[in-house]
Image: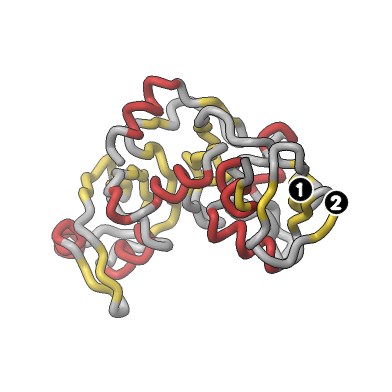
Amino acid sequence: MKTRVAKFIADSGFSSRRGAESLISQGRVKVNGHVIETPVVFIEEKDVVSIDGTKLSAKQNTKLYVFHKPINVMTTRKDPMGRKTVYDCLEDKYKSLKYVGRLDYKTTGLLLFTNDGDLARKLTLPESRIPREYIATVSKLNEQGLIQAGVGMTVDGINYRPMKITQVSDNVLRVCITEGKKNEVRIVLRACGCPVIKLHRVSFGPIKLGNLSVGKIREVDQKTIDALLKTL
């Protein structure tokens, strides 16, 4: 049975199907040692697909992993500025995994990885409404601004859904969002008068960071994966 190469790449967990098409256009994908130039290529089980020299494996059972992202690390495979990436922190056996969404350079905490590219896409769709929880240390508090963030805000023409915000201690907030726009927590808190000094993600849906050490990765158990899939 023949499979479109972009689908094979997505199923392997290396990237989404759209991401696979981009990799192909960049000349980074080889089939049986030959660079392909179009995603309209079909492969069979015997064919070997590689990206940047890394051989991809056929789709396996869905797996999810929790990674404790350190500060000053980019959530990307390659950084044009040469900064350290999350893949520089992982052992070789995890380097074919796809990250789920992003944490910015300065944000720490829970980052998911999976071997299922389509699942990675679904988990980050706004309509999935999966709650993500952060601990934010801010330079000052503005109670009226936080009330506004709790009912939803528009910043620079972009609408942000209501956030659930509770005060943990002096200048420390627990923030729960269900959308995950780029830099959402930092942008909204700054706009409502509570600039973020430190940001740390502690959960993604039913998955918790717990006491996982910085820079370490652990597999998510099947029961938790099933609970997450039921929310999609």
User: Seen from this angle, which residue lies furthest bottom?
Assistant: 157
Q: Amino acid at mark 1?
A: Ser
Q: CA distance from mark 1 to mark 2?
A: 8 Å
Q: Is residue 97 left or right of residue 203?
A: right
The quadrant in which residue 183 appears is bottom left
- Which residue has dot 2 on it? 33
Q: Amino acid at mark 2?
A: Gly
Residue at point 31% right, 62% down? 189
Is residue 177 in view?
no
x then y, percent, for residue 201: 42, 43
The reply to whether the C-beta atoms of the residues labelled 1 and 2 are less than 8 Å apart is yes
Q: Looking at the figure, which quarter contains the C terminus?
A: top left
How many numbered dots are placed on residues in this image? Answer: 2
Q: Is disc 1 placed on a helix, strand or loop?
A: strand
Q: 44 or 7, which is in the foreground?
A: 44
Q: Looking at the figure, which quarter contains the N terminus?
A: top right
The quadrant in which residue 152 appears is bottom left
User: Seen from this angle, which residue lies furthest front?
Assistant: 1
- Discs 1/2, front: 2
Circle 1 residues within 10 Å: few <14, some 14–19, many ≥20: some
